[in-house]
Image (cartoon, rainbow, N blue to C red):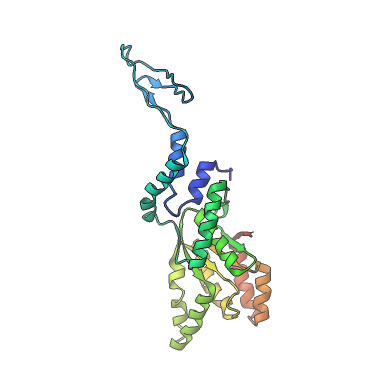
Amino acid sequence: MPVKPAAACMDAVLPVGGTRGAAAHVADACGAAERTANGAVQVDNAGSTFEMDTIDDAIAPAPLIHIKTTVTPEEWSLLCKRESSKNEARSVGVRNVPKLIEEESSKRLEKVMNSQEIINDDWFVKGKWLWVTGRDQDEAAIEATLKAIATGSEFEFASAKQMVSAWNSADLFGSNNKDRTLDKYRSVQNLLVSYLGYSSDKAEVSMLYELLDERRLNKRATILSSIYSGRELRRYYLHLGAKAEEVDRLFGCLRKMICTAAK
């Protein structure tokens, strides 16, 4: 996938807080060309003299519109504010994010904006999944949230620890109720599952397989985050006492979908 220009990159990574669309506005302005009835007009922004075409040899020249190709910080801020209300209806960002993760990912998003860093979203375009690791579970969840934002699409945030807790509690109401605890996460188009391995519960293996294999079959985008790499998490599940065949089944599903690991 070719490297994205700065404006396109900023448009991709800034879908939250009213910034998506502003970069596209700048890119469109930079590439615009005014035309008269007889064709394209050359516009010289560097000086005060402008060439003009005439309309059907008329005496009066056709006026040219000055095209602004630079944006001041104040104008950028104004564009961001104007786009804010539009973005609320576009369904972008990550829903149901814990406050800590939301605040820290917002800070990183600001740094990305200032440095014009390019965040690779090839995995999303190709229909693959992403595995994100960090020095701790919170760090991994923050980075995964930023990766989700960079796609420009809406994601649902979910904690594996909370999911497995609901999964186990369903036993009180009958085994058939287990699957119902996953209904919300099965159907959402884009899902971020964080805190893998944080529950220290071997039941997480069967719960994740039931969820992720169905998402694989329906080609729904998924980001997974953990303090562990895939290999480390596999060993950890076995250490917790999970059945080897269940662990193999889960990681067989993951190997088919994971594009790469991101730190």
Relative vertical location of residue 106 with respect to residue 117 in this rendering, above or below? below
Image location of residue 49, percent across then percent down: 43, 18
Tally of numbered tags: 0
Q: Nearer the viewer, residue 160 or 69?
A: 69
Q: Quadrant of the C terminus?
A: bottom right
Image quarter of residue 57: top left
Residue drawn at 50 percent across, 58 percent down: 106
Image location of residue 65, percent across then percent down: 37, 26
Q: Nearer the viewer, residue 81 or 177?
A: 81
Image quarter of residue 136: bottom right
Relative vertical location of residue 93 with respect to residue 50 in this rendering, above or below? below
Relative vertical location of residue 259 with respect to residue 10 in this rendering, above or below? below
Residue drawn at 44 percent across, 37 percent down: 28
Q: Quadrant of the N terminus?
A: top right
**Is residue 125 shown to the viewer in this render?**
no
Image location of residue 58, percent across then percent down: 31, 12
Q: Residue furthest front?
A: 74
84 sits left or right of 256 in the view: left
**Is residue 22 shown to the viewer in this render?**
yes
Residue drawn at 37 percent across, 23 percent down: 64
Image location of residue 86, percent across then percent down: 36, 51
